[in-house]
Image (cartoon, rainbow, N blue to C red):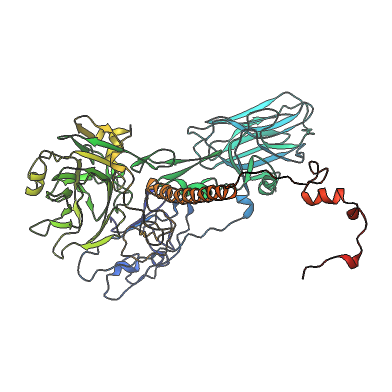
Amino acid sequence: GNPYTWWVGKANEKHYYWGGSGPGIQKCACGIERNCTDPKYYCNCDADYKQWRKDTGMLSYKEHLPVSQVVVGDVDRPGSEAKVSVGPVRCQGDRNYWNAASFVTSSSYLHFSTFQGETSADISFYFKTSASDGVFLENLGNTDFIKLELKSAVEVSFSFDVGNGPVEIVVRSPNHLNDDQWHRVNAERNVKQASLQVDQLPVEIRKAPTEGHTRLELYSQLYVGAAGGQRGFLGCIRSLRMNGVTLDLEERAKVTPGVKPGCSGHCTSYGMYCANGGKCVEKYNGYSCDCSRTAYDGPFCIKDVGAFFEEGMWLRYNFHSPGTSMKDLVSRTLLSSSDAEITVPDLNLNKEELSFSFSTTKSPCVLLYISSYTPDFMAVLVKPSGNLQIRYSLGGTKEPYNIDVDHRNMANGQPHTVNVTRNGRDIMLQLDHYPPTSYSLPAASDIQFNSPKALFLGKVIEIGKIDQDIYKYNTPGFTGCLSRVQFNQIAPLKAALRPTNASSQVHIQGELVESNCGASPLTIPPMSAATDPWHLDSVSLLSPPESFHSLFTASADFPYNGQAIGDGVNRNSAIIGGVIAVVIFTILCTLVFLIRYMFRHKGTYHTNEAKGAESAESADAAIMNNDPNFTETIDESKKEWLI
C-alpha cells in the first residue's frame, strides 16, 4: 500500500526502502531476511506493538544519497510514536578513482611522458565542465597524432592518424555535457578497430582499413589540457587511465601554474563571502553567489532590495497559481516540499521564517499580512502608539495570539529590522540588535498555518472577513520604506523589482519605486560576535521532523547584514582618527611653545664644524676624518668601556 513514511535523497526524490534493503524494494532489512517481529509485515516498526521495535541498516546506494529529509506519518494517534536517527555520510573508495585536477584557464595544461600506444590504446577518464568546448588530451608525432576533445556542448570527438590519414569518431549526446556533472569517456584503438563511448550512450565504432599503417608513432609529450595553441579544457578531469596506468594528475598539478589539484573548487575557500543565505556557485576561474533564494542582490548577496510605499499603495504575492504544484513553490524548509502530487492549498505550515526591515513615521499601519484559504493568518502591525505587534491566528482559540513590543516607538523614522521564527508552538522574535525573545502559542492553539494563500505588503486587499484591528489599521495604509522582505525562501519585493520566475505571482497597486531607505545603517551599534545570537559559525541541521534525533550536522551561516557590520567598522575608524587628530594638535601646540621660548632673544651663533662635514655620513665621521688622532690605531688600554 501507500507508505506513511519515506526519506528524500538527491534530486529531491522520495524513497520507500530502508537500511539493509535496496531501491525499489519497499522493505526493511528484516523483510529481506524474513525475520520481522510480525511476519505479516516487512518492517519491525509496522508491528504496532506496545514495546519499542527498531529497524536499522546502511543506505549504500550512492546515487540516492545523501539523505536530506525524513518524513514520518501515522504518529498522530495515541500510543503511536517514532524516533529516527540519521547517521553521517561516509565515503570510501580507490584514491586513483578520485585523482583529479582542475583547469582554471584555457591555456593551462599538464604534460607527461610520451604515450606508448603503438598498436593499442585504451583511454578512459571522467570530466565535468560548464564550458562548451576544449581539448582533453593530445599527443603528437611527425604526422601521427591522437586527440580527445569536447567539440561542442553535446559532442565528444576521438581522432587519430597512424599514417593512413586522419580518422575521427564523434559521439553526440541528446543532453548537454557541459552541465557541471561528471561524464565518463572511454576511447579504444587497436589494429582492427577504434571505438568511443560517452556515459551509457551507444558505442561508436570505426573499422580499421585492411591495408596500410597500423602503428601509432608519437614523439612529443602527452598534453592533458591545452596544446598547440588550441583552446584548452576548462573544468575537472579525474581518474585518467591510459593503457591501465592511472596518471597522477594531482601531483603534477601542484607544480603547474593554472592547474589546481583536486576538484574542491573555490567555494571551499571563499563560499563564506556569499552572505545572507546566498549559495556559492563554482566556476573554473572563480565563483559567483546565487542570491535567487534570498531577499538580497549584488555579487555577494549583501545589497538590500527595498522600495518606498506611498499612502494607499500595496503589493500582493500569491503563493501559487492555479494548478501549480507545491514542489515548485514551497520553501525547501517545509516538510512536504518534495511531494509534487499535492497542490498548494492543501499545504499546512508547521514553521515559518520571516525577516524584513522598515522605516515609517506614521501609525497605525499594516506592515505585512499573510492570508490563507482558511481563517488562519499572520500579521505584523504598527499600533497607534507606534509599538510593534506580531499577530498569529492559527485556530483553536477565540482571539488571535498577540506579541506586543512596547519598549520603544517604531514609527520614529529610523530603520528597524524584524526577524520572526516559528517552529511549532515556539516563536522567536528579534528586533534590531536587541537579544531575541522567546514566546509560545497558547496550549489550545493549533500549531499549523493551514493553506497559506497570499502575502500583502503595505495594505491588505483580501476578499472575505478579516480581523477588526487589521481592518482599522488598514486605512489609509503604510507610508514608508520596506526592505529585504523574506518569508521562508520567498522574497516578494525582489520578485517585483527583479525579473524572476515568481514575478508573475506579484500584483502591485500604485508605482513601486526601488529604494534602500528602509535599510539604512542602524543607529544602535552592532553587538559583538560573542553576544550577538545571529552571528554563529556553525549550527546543527536536523532533518525536517526536528523532534527526531539526528546525527547529521553541517556548517551553516545565519543571514546577517553585512552593511551594518561595515558601518560599525567605519565608526571605529572615526574614533581612531579623532584621537590621532587630538594628539597631532597637542604636539603642534607644544612645538610652538618651545620655539617661542628658544627665540625670546634675537642673536646669531657660529659653529666650528669639522672640514668635510658636508660629505661625511655623520658628525662623528666628520670629526674622525679631520682629527689625526683618530687615524691612529687605538690601544686596547685606552678604550673606554660602559658597564
Q: Quadrant of residue 45?
A: bottom left
Q: Is residue 263 placed above or below 93 in the rendered structure?
A: above
Q: Residue furthest bottom?
A: 51
Residue 38 horizontal/vertical position (percent): 32, 71
Is residue 483 or residue 592 the one in the foreground?
592
Q: How many marks?
A: 0
Quadrant into which the N terminus falls: bottom left
Horizontally, is 451 left or right of 238 in the view? left
Is residue 557 or residue 599 the one in the foreground?
599
Instruction: Using the rendered image of the protein, determine whether residue 471 is visible from the camera's viewpoint.
Output: yes
Q: Quadrant of residue 447?
A: bottom left
Q: What residue appears at the point 79 percent right and 33 percent down from the top-left corner?
A: 217
Residue 353 horizontal/vertical position (percent): 28, 52
Instruction: Using the rendered image of the protein, determine whether residue 502 is visible from the camera's viewpoint.
Output: no
Q: What residue appears at the point 31 percent right and 46 percent down from the top-left corner?
A: 489
Is residue 9 or residue 221 the one in the foreground?
221
Is residue 581 or residue 291 the one in the foreground?
581
Q: What residue appears at the point 20 percent right and 69 percent down from the top-left corner?
A: 78
Q: Is residue 98 placed above or below 194 in the rendered structure?
A: below
Residue 370 horizontal/vertical position (percent): 19, 46
Residue 11 horizontal/vertical position (percent): 41, 47
Horizontally, is 285 left or right of 74 in the view? right
Horizontally, is 74 left or right of 401 in the view? right
Quadrant into which the C terminus falls: bottom right
